[in-house]
Image (tube, helix red, strand yellow):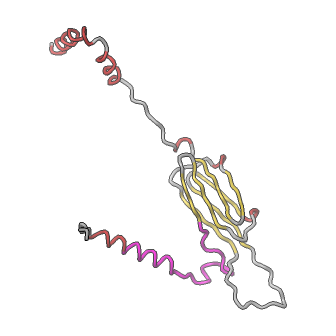
Amino acid sequence: MAIQRFEPFREVVSLRDAVNTLLQDSFVRPMGLLGEGGAAAMLPLDITENENEFIVRASLPGVRPEDVQITAHGDTLTIRGEIKEDQEKKDEQYHLRERRFGLFQRTVTLPTTISADKAQAQFDNGVLTLILPKAEESKPKQIRIGGKSQTQVQGKGEGQGQGQGQAQAATAARSS
C-alpha cells in the first residue's frame, strides 16, 4: 500500500467539479426559454488549436449550409442559423416530438485574434468545420539577444595571450 500525501483541497476541487457537472448536465430549460417550438438552445462545438490556427467543428444535423451564418471579429466567433420545421400533414398526428427547430446561435471567444479574411469553412455530413488562421500579430515571435553583452563576450575570446596586458590596462584605467 502506497502512502499518499494529504492534500485537503484536492477533494474540494473535485467535489466542486462534480457539482458543476451535475448542475450543467441536469439543468432543464422550460420550453418558453427555448423560443417558439423549442429552438436549438445549444450548439455543440469542438475547438482545437495548433501553432498556426484554430480548428472549430460544430454538429449541425439537418441544417443546410445556406441556413448558417458565420462571423468573426478579432477573437470572437459567432455561428448562427436556423433549423427549419417540417410541415405538418393534416392526416398525421405526432405521438412523440423531440427534434428541435428554430433559430440557434453560439458565440465563443478564442484565446487570440484570428485572420477572418483567410478563414475556410467546410460542411460535410452535418458537421461544419472551420479553419481559422491566427493573426500574425498574435503569433509568438523569437527575439534575438544583442547589444553590449554580446560584443563583450566576443571580445573576451579573441587574443587571450596578448589580452592579459590589455585587461590590466583597462582595469587600471577604470580605477583612476
Where residue 105 appears, as percent x and y from the top left, is 63, 67
Q: Is residue 43 magenta?
A: yes
Q: Is residue 18 magenta?
A: yes
Q: Quadrant of residue 163?
A: top left
* Farthest-out residue, front: 1
Asked if residue 129 lies left or right of residue 108, the reply is: right
Asked if residue 76 lies left or right of residue 23, the reply is: right
Q: Quadrant of residue 46?
A: bottom right
- Residue at figure coordinates x 15%, y 12% from the top left: 176
- Between 109 and 170, the residue placed more toward the observer is 170
- Residue at figure coordinates x 33%, y 22% from the top left: 148
Which portion, as a residue range, is magenta? Answer: 15-44
- Is the residue 163 above or below the residue 73 in the image? above
Q: Quadrant of residue 158?
A: top left
- Is the residue 135 above or below the residue 2 in the image? above
- Residue at figure coordinates x 72%, y 72% from the top left: 83
Where residue 129 appears, as percent x and y from the top left, is 65, 58
